[in-house]
Image: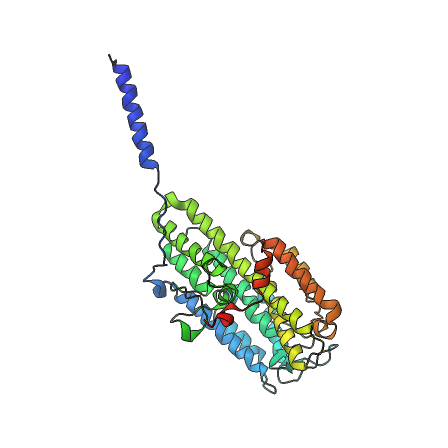
Amino acid sequence: MLTTRSLLLMLLASISFFACQKDEKTPLAIPETYLSPEFSTNTPLETGYANALNALVNEAKKGRTTGTVVDAAQLENLYKTGGLDLITTPYYNGRLIGANGFFGELAKASGNVYTPGSPSGQGGTLGGYLFDENGLEMEQMIEKGLFAAAFYNYATTLMSGEISPKRVDQLIAIYGAHPDFPNTPTAGKAANPDRFMANYVARRDKNDGQGMYTQMKKHFITLRAAVEAGEKYNEERDAALEGIQLTWEKINAATVVNYCHSVISTMSATNTSDADKAKALHAYGECVGFLHGWRTVSADFKVLSDAEIDQLLVLLNAPYNTTPTSYTFVTDPVNQLPKLTQIITTLQQKFGFTNQEIEDFKNNWVAVQGR
C-alpha cells in the first residue's frame, strides 16, 4: 500500500520528468533556401557600401588607359563620401590616404608607361594594367584590400553582440551574396549575381554541392534559422557563425592560391612577352591585395595571425613596412617563383586544403563551366 510519502515522491518525479521533457528541444529545422522577403529593406547601408566600392574601383580603373591621369583627391573623396573610411580598419585607412598612400601612388603612376625592372619614374601602364614603379598594382591594393579591411572588418561588427534576422541579411549583403545564392557572378546568368567575396567563392566552387559556395550558403541558412528559433538554438547559431568566419577566410586563401598558380604558370614559360609579364604582375597584385587587407582585422575573427600575414607578404616581396620589389617576379622568376609555391604550401597546411583542392583552385570554375 502506497504511503502519503510515496505518493508525494512519485508526484515530484512525474513533475520532474515532464519538466525535463518540456525543456528538451527538437532538432533545428533548416530550410533548403534562404527566405527573407525583407532583404532589400534590411540592407540599404550595405548596398551603399557596395556601390561606393564599385564607384571607387571604376575611378581607379581609368588609370589602366595609357595617358589617362587619375586624381588622388577624387579617389579619396569617393572613398570618404561613400562611407568606406568608417568601416575600414584604422591601419588600412592609413595605407590608402596620403601622398604616399595607395591612392596617391596610383595617381602618380597614371598617365605614364611602365617597363618592368629596377624602379625608375613613377610607374605606368603595361598590358592594360597600371603599376607603380615597383611593379605593384595599386588598384588591387585598393579593391581587394578593402574586401577584408572594410567589408570583412564590418562583418565582424555584425557578428558581435546580439544577432537578429536583419543582421544575417546584412552579413549576406556585405559578403556580396543575395538570398537567391545563384553561384555565379555573371549578370546574364542570374537576376542577382554574386559580387565581392561571393564572386570569388563561385570561381573556386565546382558547383557539385560540396564546395565552399554551398558550405557558405548552408551556414547562412542555418544561422537565420537558429536566430529565428530562439535562445534554445544558440549553440547552432554560434556554430554557424564560426563556419561563416572560417569559410570566408578560406575563400580568401583559396583565391590567393589561385593567383599564385597563375603567376607560376605564366612566368614558367620559356619566353614571356610584355603582355605575359603584365598578366603575371596583375595576378601577383591580386595576391598581395587579398592578403594585405586582412592585416589588423580582429584576431578573434580570423585564422591567420598578423605575424603570419607579415611572413606571407615578405615572401611576396611586398612587406607592409618597406618598399616592395614586386617586379622581381617577372625579371627573376627562377629565384622568385619558389616563394609562391611556399605560400601555397603554407596556406594549404593552415587551412587544411587537400591536394585535390589545391589543384582545383587553379581553375576559375565559373569560366570553365560557363555559368
Q: Farthest residue in the top direction? A: 1
Q: Is residue 57 left or right of residue 125?
A: left
**Residue 142 placed where, x, y %?**
57, 71
The residue lying at 38 percent from left, 63 percent from top is: 179
Q: Which of 294 and 128 is in front in this view?
A: 128
Compared to 42, does 102 lie above or below? below
| Percent x, y of residue 122 | 68, 80
Residue 345 showing in the rendered view:
yes
Number of numbered discs on residues? 0
Quarter of the image with the N terminus in it: top left
Residue 127: image quadrant is bottom right
Front-most of residues 229 and 91:
229
Q: Name the image quarter holding the C terminus.
A: bottom left
How does the figure colour the protein chain or chains?
A: rainbow
Q: Which residue lies furthest to the bottom in this view?
A: 67
Q: In this view, does 258 lie to the left or right of 237?
A: right
Where residue 241 appears, as percent x and y from the top left, is 46, 52
Question: Residue 289: image x %, image y %?
Answer: 60, 67
Residue at 57 percent across and 64 percent down: it is 255
Residue 293 appears left or right of 208: right
Can I make out residue 305 in this image?
no
Q: Which residue is drawn at 57% across and 62% down?
A: 254
**Quarter assignment of residue 16:** top left
315 versus 101 height, above or below = above
